[in-house]
């Protein structure tokens, strides 16, 4: 019998080309909806895969910046960002409605995700975008982040997210992708990383500090070079350690 239950998610529809391989290994997916990547064709394809494999669906909106893959902060007026985010989410929802699927959650992408974790004004803007929607949805967000606190205060259900294949700084931010130690590639290390967070509610920073963390959903990045192998390994090994993926 499993003592722990977790969700494993990945960002899909980003043009990496491995969506069909990743989807059967996930319990949730975050679908790019036109901000940093994605279009009607890719959204429809990924939604079809999610329906086939009974995977929970999330919208993965971003700064509208495909040139930089949403990984640079854009200076935008709040209203313009709100309109962009709602347009992205509703573009996905329109297709999901056609396929009789429901949006389970929203997970902002890249620079926006990192910004709202620490910046109150940006976090408020994202909350206003979510509140503008005509349906209720969860928000995937980091533990102890500005966006998680404000979302909870505004009656938006928050699911704490951590990163299976990324290293953490001492302040619980992610190590910059510009650094060689940003990404964890070894499958055994990814497993240990998750188990420490699940069973001990701790994560070891790159400097060896044990930090408090809570998470019930764990992201494996689809563009990590061995993402499929990591996910296959986790699906095999986590249940042996009484951690069920659901």
Image (cartoon, rainbow, N blue to C red):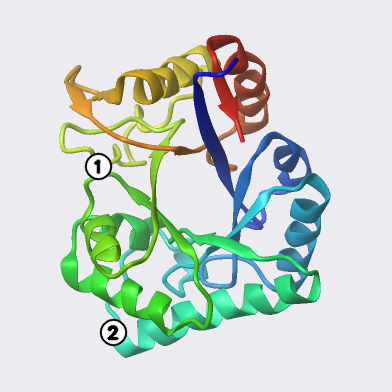
Report helix, strand or loop for mark 1. Answer: loop
Q: 160 or 208, which lies in front?
A: 160
Give the labeled residue for mark 2: 78
The spot of residue 122 in percent (x, y) is: 25, 71
The spot of residue 212 in percent (x, y) is: 21, 29
Place residue 208 in its image quadrant.
top left
Q: 83 or 215, which lies in front?
A: 215
Q: Residue at x 61, y 65 (%)?
A: 103
Q: Earlier in the sequence, mark 1 or mark 2?
A: 2
Assess disc 2: are there few (<14), some (14-19) or many (≥20) residues with their C-alpha within 10 Å of its C-alpha: some
Q: Residue at x 56, y 37 (%)?
A: 8
Tell me: residue 168, above or below residue 28. above
On screen, residue 175 versus residue 215, left or right, reads left
Tell me: residue 20, above or below residue 187. below
Which quarter of the image is occupied by the N terminus?
top right
Give the labeled residue for mark 1: 173
Which quarter of the image is occupied by the C terminus?
top right
In space, the residues marked 1 and 2 are separated at their CA atoms by 24 Å
Q: 28 or 190, which lies in front?
A: 28
Q: Residue at x 75, y 48 (%)?
A: 54
Place residue 53 in its image quadrant.
top right
Report helix, strand or loop for mark 2. Answer: helix
The spot of residue 205 in percent (x, y) is: 24, 25
Q: Residue at x 64, y 74 (%)?
A: 93
The spot of residue 162 in percent (x, y) is: 39, 38
Q: 214 or 119, which lies in front?
A: 214
């Amino acid at each position: 019998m499993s003592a722990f239950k977790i969700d494993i998610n990945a960002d899909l529809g980003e043009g990496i080309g491995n969506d069909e391989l990743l989807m059967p290994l996930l319990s949730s997916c975050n679908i790019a909806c036109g901000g940093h990547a994605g279009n009607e064709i890719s959204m429809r394809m990924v939604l079809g895969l999610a329906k086939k494999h009974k995977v929970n669906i999330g919208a993965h909106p971003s700064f509208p910046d495909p040139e930089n893959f949403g990984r640079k902060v854009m200076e935008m007026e709040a209203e313009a960002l709100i309109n962009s985010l709602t347009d992205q989410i509703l573009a996905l929802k329109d297709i999901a409605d056609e396929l009789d699927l429901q949006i389970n959650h929203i997970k902002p992408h890249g620079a926006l995700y990192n910004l709202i974790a620490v910046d109150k004004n940006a976090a408020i803007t994202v909350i206003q975008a979510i509140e503008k929607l005509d349906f209720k949805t969860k928000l995937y967000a980091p533990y102890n982040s500005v966006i998680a606190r404000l979302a909870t205060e505004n009656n938006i259900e928050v699911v704490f997210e951590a990163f299976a294949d990324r290293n953490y700084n001492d302040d619980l931010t992610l190590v910059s992708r510009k650094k060689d130690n940003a990404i964890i590639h070894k499958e055994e290390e990814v497993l240990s990383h998750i188990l420490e967070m699940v069973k001990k509610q701790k994560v070891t920073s790159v400097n060896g500090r044990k930090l408090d963390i809570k998470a019930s959903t764990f992201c494996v990045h689809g563009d990590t070079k061995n993402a499929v192998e990591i996910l296959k390994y986790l699906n095999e090994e986590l249940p042996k350690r009484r951690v069920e993926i659901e």
